[in-house]
Image (spheres, rainbow, N blue to C red):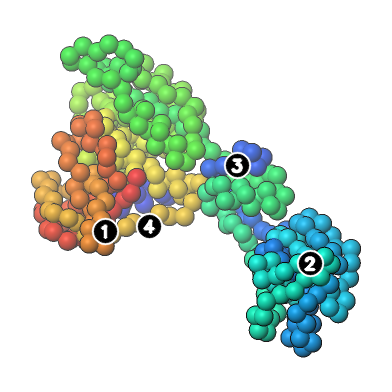
Amino acid sequence: MKTISEALNLILAQADLIESETVSIHQAYNRILAEDIKADRDYPPFNRASMDGYALNISDWNEHGLRQFKVVEELHAGAVPTQKLGKGDCLKIMTGAAVPPEADAIIKVELSAHQGTTVSFEEIGDLKKWRNIALRGEDRKTGEILATKGQLCNAAIISVLAVIGKMEVKVAKLPKVSIISTGTEVLPPDKTVLPHQIRDSNSFALQNLLKKFNIGLEHKILVPDDKTLLREAILKGLQSDILILSGGVSMGDADFVPEVLNSQGVQTIFHKIQIKPGKPFWFGKKENGTVVFGLPGNPMSCQVGFRVFIEPYLNAKLGLPKPQSLYLPLMGTHQKRSKFTEYFPCKIINKNEKTFIKTHEYNGSGDIAAMIGSDGLAAHPAKSKKLNENTIIEFLPW
């Protein structure tokens, strides 16, 4: 039986970086960048007016003491100046416009009095060079990296792609994933169940947990505990890059998943982990490269298995940075009965300007609503039977 760290290392060892593909900017949202994004030119690309006002040369103001200027032109954003500024000249300029080369300061319009072709200003002392002007390249220089490989392409990055005119971008290819839920007692959610039956929830939880990575499904299959039907479902699922099963991996007489997987050429890498909930976790790989995760059937075990093991695998495979664990003090106490590391749902509590985590009440790994209202999972280490108030423990946010 593997420890959590041993199991995770074995899983991550199979997380070869996935290939990249080029997509349109219109399809890039929530995809993972597979290339660095660089500035195509300086930004701003010209000396830019940062507010409405009057552009002038500070030597006229500081050295010659001029306070009244001739307005030779009015310049809006997107327009090009047609007049060259001479001594005592200025131009009225709008925010975002390109400042002419002779001007090195802008006095904001609120400090001016414009009459006819002249404008006078309030006394404001010496002008500093480049006042109210954003200099060319002060935000980003040509060739500077704006976004890096491995970043999630969010709205801010899409905006930058548009600014630099990059209409296509390389992103990590999304793996093909299939999900199989098993169990003779498990029915589709739209079916009427008898007292001894339950509805399938795990495939829906897994499907939506995958959406964090923008991953859709190739196949979602529900099969009873029947070797023939299970074999057919697994053969279909093994056409994907990743196959995730729930149920059928424990030691019961009808837990056929490991046996059927092996019969279809899937090598067992490990079976069982020192964790609660989720001890029967199964992991293997087929020669064609398909990676297979076998999760226990209880809803909480299934979701814990995804967060602790499958999510880090997907991060690594897609080239995302390794998520850092948070360590926060516990509010209250937590007792465990097993000898394994135990994960339990918790909430974030802010009190007296400090952040704590607190146990979110639940009723065991079969509790269908255990995770509702929780902010993530906390880890109760194997070596400690009881966690006391203010004990610092690992927290995995959803």
Q: Which mark is residue 355?
A: 1
Please name the residue that numbered disc 2 is placed on: 115
Q: Which one is closest to the eye, mark 3 or mark 4?
A: 3
Q: Earlier in the sequence, mark 2 or mark 1?
A: 2
Position of residue 46 in the picture relative to residue 375 (left or right): right
Q: Please state which amino acid type lies under the numbered disc 2.
A: Gln
Q: Circle 4 sits in a helix, a strand or a loop, which is it?
A: loop
Please say if the residues under marks 1 and 3 sit with CB atoms less than 8 Å apart: no
Position of residue 310 in the picture relative to residue 332 (left or right): right
Q: Is residue 143 shown above or below 173?
A: below
Q: Position of residue 35 (x, y in %)?
A: 62, 53
Q: Earlier in the sequence, mark 3 or mark 4?
A: 3
How far apart marks 3 and 2 lie (CA) works out to 52 Å
Q: Which mark is residue 3?
A: none
Q: Position of residue 33 (x, y in %)?
A: 58, 49
Please name the residue that numbered disc 3 is placed on: 28
Q: Earlier in the sequence, mark 4 or mark 2?
A: 2
Q: Which one is closest to the eye, mark 2 or mark 1?
A: 2
Q: Which one is closest to the eye, mark 3 or mark 2?
A: 2
